[in-house]
Amino acid sequence: MIVQKAHAKINIGMDIKGLRQDRYHEIDTVMQTVELGDRITFAEREKGIQFWCDDSSIKNNENTAFIAAKLFMKEMGIKRGIKIDLYKSIPLFSGLGGGSADAAAVLRGLNFLFNTNLPYEDLEKMAAMIGSDVPFCIRGGTQRATGRGEVLKPLKDFSDVWFVIIKPEDSVETAWAYKEYDKAGNPVRPDMDLIESLLEERDIEGLKGNVVNIFEKVVIPHKPSIQKVMDDLSETDAVTVFMTGSGSAVAAMYSEMRLASVAYTSLSRKHDDIFITKTSGGLK
């Protein structure tokens, strides 16, 4: 048996450049993995794909982990079977990339288990067939993502920065969020070049007031619990507070672990889905 960790991701700034001819949206964002993650175990079996998850709401043959396994076995011509057990920690419909992280971890795990030795670049190409965020999750770390999210530019390491993340009562489906964006006008846009520069310089204080998620102004009016979480986190000693992805999770960045710990201890009395975590480096 082997084990893979599927790291959650946050978006440090999120912009939408427009609608592409293929009907996908052109995005511009910095994706960053954090230590919060799911755990996936793999074991060979005689034939077929056997999938189990400790969250009963995740359907056996419809989730991204199963889809990734089916794709990998087909593409690599593998006739043997596999047993996959998924232990969830990343909340669903939160903008933390749990499904994408699970799919990427399955591709990495099967590549190791079956000794297929595909380089990460080939795994990323396979990952793009599953979902827009999956290629990033193959290696993770700090990367600027454009296109549908599959065009990746690795940035300098931004690991060991502390966050408190809260999943509000409201959930957000990505397709709905994009439809709401398409109906909105004149959204507040981030300066992604500035955000990239500040991250490269590791200027955490400089990020204050500059991390903007274009989805916030269109999603939050429909999801009041997100605003409540943002207000709660803004009352702590966070450098910056922002919604990640299309929502609904809100991330607060801290200049040191102590400040994150104080915020986590205080707000855990009020919020159930709350996590203290730190950014993680990518695979080389």
Image (cartoon, grey):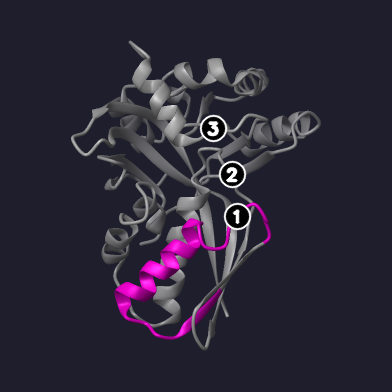
Circle 2 Cα neighbour tier, 10 Å, few/some/many (<14 / 14–19 / ≥20) = some
- According to the image, label 3 marks what residue? 172
Tag 2's secondary structure?
loop
Q: Picture coordinates of residue 261 (x, y %)? A: 70, 37
Image vertical order of residue 96 relative to residue 281, above or below = above
Residue at the limit of the structure toward the top, as seen here: 186
Which numbered disc flags the more N-terminal residue, 1 or 3?
1
Whether residue 214 is visible here, answered yes or no, is: no
| Callout 1–callout 2 Cβ contact below 8 Å | yes
Left or right placement of residue 128 versus residue 208 in this view: left
Q: Looking at the rendering, in which quadrant would you find the N terminus?
A: bottom right
- According to the image, label 2 marks what residue? 92
Cα distance, mark 1 to mark 2? 10 Å
Image vertical order of residue 122 relative to residue 97, above or below = below
Q: Picture coordinates of residue 49 (x, y %)? A: 51, 75
Q: Residue 241 is drawn in which quadrant?
A: top right
| Callout 3–callout 2 Cβ contact below 8 Å | no
Query: Is-magenta flag for residue 71?
Result: yes
Residue type at the position of mark 2: Leu
Cα distance, mark 1 to mark 3? 16 Å
Cα distance, mark 3 to mark 2? 9 Å
**What stretch of residues is rendered in magenta?**
54-83
Query: Is-magenta flag for residue 64?
Result: yes
Tag 1's secondary structure?
loop
Residue 58 is tagged as 1
Circle 1 Cα neighbour tier, 10 Å, few/some/many (<14 / 14–19 / ≥20) = some
